[in-house]
Amino acid sequence: MGHPVDVGAVIRGARCSARLTQAQLGSRCGYSASAISRIESNRLRPDYQSMVRLASVLGIGLDQLNGSGVPEGAVVATVALRSSDEEDAVRRRELLAKALAAGTTALVGAGPASASAATDNPAPGLEDVLFRLPAVEPVPLTLLTERTAAARRAFRAARYADLEGALPGLLAAAESTRDAVTGRARQQACALLARAYVVASELAAKQHSDAAWVAADRALTAARASGMPVPIGEASRVLAITMRRSGRPLSAVRLLSREADNLDSTEADAGAVRTTLLLTAAYSAATGGERTTALSLLDEAQEDVERLPEVPELFTVDATRAQVDVYRIGALTALGTPDEGVKVVAGLNIAHLPTAERRARAWTDAARMWHTLGDGPRTFAALRRVEAEASQEVRRPALRALTSDLLYGPTRVRGLREFAVRTGALAV
């Protein structure tokens, strides 16, 4: 007898290969995105007719879905799926009403209290909302600039729940404004729209949401329409991140290298964006096992940083020597040589990184390094620093998985169970 089929994994793999979001697959099959999500996580088992429909839409053989394999211990329901257009319409209306009500207030007025009110998923509903933005009137470019800057501040402060609440309204306003203006004003509106989608893609990527693909693609389309090199570079970077996350790291390297070559390294903003492209390319190469390429790109980024006449503030990631070190730690761990990153961590003053999101990312890379080295106490210490910097960051799926792995590892770490419960890695 052969091994049982992991139906959820097969469907998710085929969907990702077809570059479909859960919402898109659900729409083509007449199902809700939430139903597709439950199928892929093996919490819902479709009946035979539903299997036939899914296989047809995904272009795979029905034999690939035959079997009853689900992860051991999984709780599933076996049902015939039915179209839930009415349910989805109600849900979208509720999401859009919430987004419009939040508006800029969610970003500008948010403080520590709202930041601490973290949800399990800082971007619930974003995938649905991207396909049906609310209808809003155009706004003056000055106001659109302010709202886009507020979104940037929320991301850099790791206030993800606040950002998720305001993004639909911001994106809708940017789309409407872009369509209402011409000439130079349209170029500026396109650049702002691109940056709004960049931050949407960054947010979705943190949750491994398929919305990252959609937002990144729209960001690059808007950026190219602006004709401005910096937004084009920023959008190319988030698109490459989605490519890497979907299992195409070397394609991401090629995209980033090509876009980096199009930027003038002697001009401050363009040179800084070029550096961030090289850093993302280096990490992508490392995840693809290309050690020589990864280290060469890191060295090139470091040389670029040292040549920059100043350190301009970019939209989500700054080009600094400290950022080069953070990416080097992540790349060395991905390459399977985390011991080489220990010295880098020792020489890095994470407290001097400019934003909460970047400090949390640095501690995350340190935690992964220590975990790969088998040092449970230091892994947990780094995770605690992530929580101290950004409470919503530590609830990301990747961080929960790392916490869970540490919890069930061979080393008992004092306080880890309480941390796992607090951050959602362990249900009680």
Image: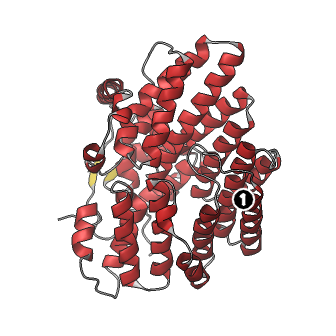
Crowding at mark 1 (Cα within 10 Å: few <14, some 14-19, many 20+): many
At which x and y percent is residue 205? Answer: 50, 50
Left or right position of 219 against 292: left
Q: Residue furthest left?
A: 428
The answer to whether residue 134 is seen in the rendering is yes
Q: Amino acid at mark 1?
A: Val
Q: Nearer the viewer, residue 43 or 348?
A: 348
Instruction: Determine the image quadrant of residue 88.
Output: top left
Q: Nearer the viewer, residue 207 or 182?
A: 182
Measuring 31% from the left and 24% from the top, which residue is drawn there? 101
Left or right position of 328 against 103: right
The answer to whether residue 70 is seen in the rendering is no
Left or right position of 288 against 79: right
At which x and y percent is residue 306? Answer: 74, 61
Picture quarter with the C terminus: bottom left
Q: Is residue 3 above or below residue 320?
A: below
Instruction: Determine the image quadrant of residue 405.
Output: bottom left
Picture quarter with the N terminus: bottom left
At which x and y percent is residue 119? Answer: 28, 48
Residue located beneath label 1 in the image: 305
Measuring 42% from the left and 37% from the top, which residue is drawn there? 126
Q: Residue furthest front?
A: 309
At which x and y percent is residue 246? Answer: 58, 55
Where disc 1 sits, the SS reads: helix
* Image color mode: secondary structure
